[in-house]
Amino acid sequence: MLPEAADVLIVGAGPAGLAAAITLRRQGLQKLVVVEREAEAGGIPRLCHHSGFGWRDLRRLLSGPSYARRYREAAGRLDIALHTETTITGWHGPGLLSYSGPAGPGRLRARAVLLATGCRERPRAARLVPGSRPQGIFTTGSLQQFVYGHGLPVGRRAVIIGAELVSLSALMTLRHAGVAVVAMLSELPAHQIYPPYHPAPFFLLDRLGRAPLLMGVQVSRILGQRRVEGLEITHLASGRLETLLCDTLVFSGDWIPEHEMARLGGLRLDPGTQGPLVDPGFRTSRRGVFAAGNLLRGAETADNCAREGQAAASQILRFLHAERWPDHEIALRVEPPLRWVFPNALRWPATAGLHSLAFRAAELLARVGVQVMQNGHVLHEQHFPTLVPNVSMALSARWLPAVDPAGGEVCLRIG
Amino acid sequence: MMREIDYDVAIIGAGAVGTAIARALARYRLRVVLVERQPDVGMGTSKASTAIWHTGFDAKPGTLEARLLQRSYPLTERFMAEAGVPVERIGGLLIAWNDEQLQTLPSLMHNAQQNGVHDARLLEAGEIYAREPHLGPGARGGLYVPGEGIFCTYTLPLAFATQAVLNGVSLRLNFAVEGVLPAGEGFYRLEAAGASLRCRFLVNAAGLHSDEIDHLLGHHAFQVRPRRGELIVYDKFARELLSHVLLPVPTATTKGVLISPTVYGNVLLGPTAEELRDKSATETSAAGLQSLLARGRAILPALLQEEVTASYAGLRAATEHGDYQIRAHPQQRYICVGGIRSTGLSGAMGIAEHVVELLAEAGLVLKPRDEFVPVRMPFIGEAGTRPYQSAERIAANPDYGRIVCHCERVTRGEILDALHAVIPARTVDGLRRRTRALQGRCQGFNCQGALLALLVRATGQPAERLLMLEPGDAT
């Protein structure tokens, strides 16, 4: 059973939530409740049976399951109770949330809440792909559950839709399951798979080099009544139609934050990220509610999410101590073709320093200058050789002191 | 070859209409069999409709359809309450978007009154926007029909069939009728691949295939012309954008594109109407989906800001005729129930009573049984208490607190119930229709593997067959 009250409630025990819980407990916080709706804590890495985890937070390279296990064990050593199979079901006032689980439904009051509910891949239907609805259509997430979670058969010939970092995870999962990969597709003219940190290139590029990439194509129709029989694609440059014969489709990437609890709690969302609007201190638009990890935007690597969890935990402790919530806010926005910037709000009095901001573009851009504007003035300009969709770039934050708190919103644009 | 069993009545087709007829006949001392070509009930037209509970206000007065819809409404209302079928009587708002449509509203109201729908009333544009503030610009006026509602199109035929089975009706799934032959002594023999059975009376409720069965009996009164309807289901976050079924002014061929809440808390946009020849063409098309988006943008602009949860297409069993094609052939002891387009779920109980009367007129002796066992279905709607919300249910069985499908909050207890029900789920789709699992915004990102593992364990079927990776039907 959950207690009726806590100082901090953490919703979601993936990398961000677990890292935050560990930081809070190490700082001496006792009344801490962590809920996880799955039967096991650890988040998405649990089902990513390949290397590439832990570089920035644990200073080593681990497989996803080992990475998740390390966090679970660290939480266990600190006596942090992880309430698995427990779902937060709604809000009933400031800090008052309802939940349900095998011990029954209940309510819990928390002084501070950290939402770390992660993200999901946009499934076929949400992408409005026409055609039939046969068996054999996956996301990377459901594919990994089939293969690693339950040992279920997948198919014989697969097409991966999407060519971002997670698509490589789909590729490796299919190879592990003995499924031939017919093609990896993207509407964009080039793949968007970049090594997220230094030791990774060998491991990633080797696999990428052997992947049958098919860029600049659009998915036009799914074929097959009972089972996938093929995929009709359109080559965007020529308009030519082509049919790929396959019995399996994996829709990978195209992330959406899992923001149900954020929206039900009335948190303002950023139109670009579709995650809750947060300032550099991971504070949302609602007093006492923080957010971290891939709920903020889809998707960064697990180590980044864990480090956000740690940073959010420090801010939560400050809030519990001082009970202050900055009340003056300026929004941070982007103009197309930029897609989003994170963090996406500035608040005063500021509590957190910031070295850099993350931002993404919606299309492939070369040799561009990104300008930070407020009230018609250029606060900062920075040049980038390339901007690749689905890959975050770092924008220096040294212009922050120049922002006029009494001025209008701050906007990023291509200069 | 299975042993032949003799039945008094065989019903071909376990859609909404066939299951309702089976249930109606289960009240009497009869041996009844319900045969279905698919591995589950409600797999054809019934499962891919707009899920609107029609009053029949817009049916052509005097037609059989209008009469049977009127007869069906109170029967369906009572049955849904008894059986626990999710239903919300939210009212329909028929909206005129131009002068021409505005001028037809009084005649539509007159039409409604002729069909026994006396509580319909005209609304000014201002009243419409007061009721539906998110509506797009340009609504000129409307007709409010309080009796229109939404219901669960999965639970309703399952409830009919379950009550029929509980009261002695035999359900034969995977029984595709290939031949109807005279078998002597006033019997027919129904033949399917590897199986056959004998019956004295025959009811054809074969939906899209009702014309083919009719041909086997030597009749050519109508031809099914499948009319495809594509639909888009929006995320639950869109639910707060509307509170009625938003109906367009109907034309001769279709009720038009509507926007409606669903009993699962989503919002439905559709259907398109496209005449086809292929009775299996249930795929969506780029043009169809784009045309729906355009209509949706005009009627409820904010809807398009939300994520799409699903899109699908269904076929209505339309014919060259404007009315239901229900015909009795007493000499043949045969009733044809064809051409039930669009309104089959709403009309099913009225149709069933009508068919029972026709069978009696054709010589079937009806002796009521002493007892009619009631049915209570698992509740899968949003307007009520779900198992995960119930302290009592979870205390009795903690599996009702173990949410497996997070988007729809479906628990392990409900999944296991569906796998061991009177008519159990035997396929992935059967499990979805009984529980809502896999029907939510993530479309299986989180739970597809877990559900399949449970299905494999409960049905004893290899995963390859359930996933259609090897030939053969899930059985």
Image: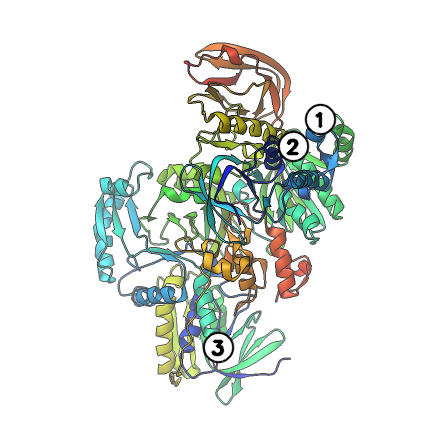
Looking at the rendered structure, the secondary structure element under dot 2 is loop
Looking at the rendered structure, the secondary structure element under dot 3 is loop
Measure the alpha-carbon separation of dots 1 and 3. Answer: 66 Å
Label 1 is found on which chain of the structure? A
Q: Nearer the viewer, residue B84 or B205?
A: B84
Looking at the rendered structure, the secondary structure element under dot 1 is loop
Count the numbered circles shown. 3
State the scheme by which the image is colored. rainbow
Label 2 is found on which chain of the structure? A
Horizontally, is B341 left or right of A205 in the view?
A: left
Measure the alpha-carbon separation of dots 2 and 1. Answer: 10 Å
- Name the residue rendered at 38%, 49% in the picture: B260
User: How far across and down, in percent of the image, does residue A412 sit?
Assistant: 51, 18
Camera-near label (1 vs 3) is: 1
- Name the residue rendered at 66%, 61% in the picture: B465
Measure the alpha-carbon separation of dots 3 and 2. Answer: 57 Å
Q: Find out whether the residues at labels 2 and 1 contact each other: C-beta distance under 8 Å.
A: yes
| Label annotation for residue B169 | 3
- Name the residue rendered at 59%, 50% in the picture: B447
| Label annotation for residue A301 | 2
Horizontally, is B193 left or right of B150 in the view?
A: right
- Which residue is tagged 1? A197
Give the residue type at disc 2.
Thr
User: How far across and down, in percent of the image, does residue A234 sit?
Assistant: 61, 38
